[in-house]
Image (cartoon, rainbow, N blue to C red):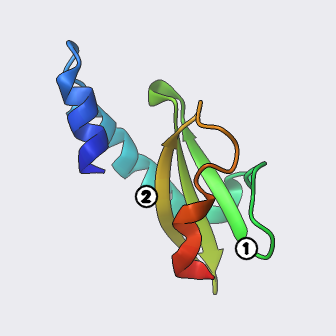
């Protein structure tokens, strides 16, 4: 997350703190009701992967639901090619 905050802080608007606040709110919402968020279109077979889209920053917070718990495993820009984040799933395989 630090890299993303640094990226937004390096821009003229200096919005790193705003991105971090939005991320924290989104993660809290995921924790409260993970299954309200939609499954990903570019999912991985055998895993329940969902996303929380942070529209203000065009970011997808991807998380897996395992044993009724949600685990955030990556944040990717919405323009990334589908499935580009699959390599980040080693922890859950």
- Residue furthest to the bottom: 67
Q: Give the label on residue 28, or none.
A: 2
At horizontal 59% and vertical 36% (from top left) the residue drawn is 80
> Quick check: marks 1 and 2 in contact, CB under 8 Å?
no
Q: Can the viewer see residue 23 in this picture?
A: yes
Where is the C terminus found, in terms of image quarters? bottom right
Side of 82 where 17 appears, left or right: left
At horizontal 80% and vertical 70% (from top left) the residue drawn is 45
At horizontal 37% and vertical 40% (from top left) the residue drawn is 22
- Tag 1: Cα neighbours inside 10 Å, few (<14), some, or many (≥20)? few
Q: Can the viewer see residue 32 in this picture?
A: no
Secondary structure under the numbered disc 1 in the rendered image: loop
Q: Give the label on residue 62, or none.
A: none
Residue hosting label 1: 47
Q: Quadrant of residue 21?
A: top left
Cα separation between marks 1 and 2: 21 Å
Residue 44 picture location, percent across and down: 75, 65
């Amino acid at each position: 997350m630090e890299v993303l905050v640094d990226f937004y802080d390096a821009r003229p608007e200096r919005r790193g703190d705003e991105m971090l606040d939005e991320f924290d709110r989104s993660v809290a919402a995921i924790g409260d009701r993970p299954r309200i968020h939609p499954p990903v279109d570019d999912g991985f077979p055998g895993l329940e992967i969902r996303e929380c889209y942070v529209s203000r920053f065009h970011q997808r917070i991807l998380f897996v639901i395992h044993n009724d718990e949600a685990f955030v495993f990556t944040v990717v820009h919405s323009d990334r090619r589908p499935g580009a984040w699959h390599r980040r799933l080693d922890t859950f395989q």
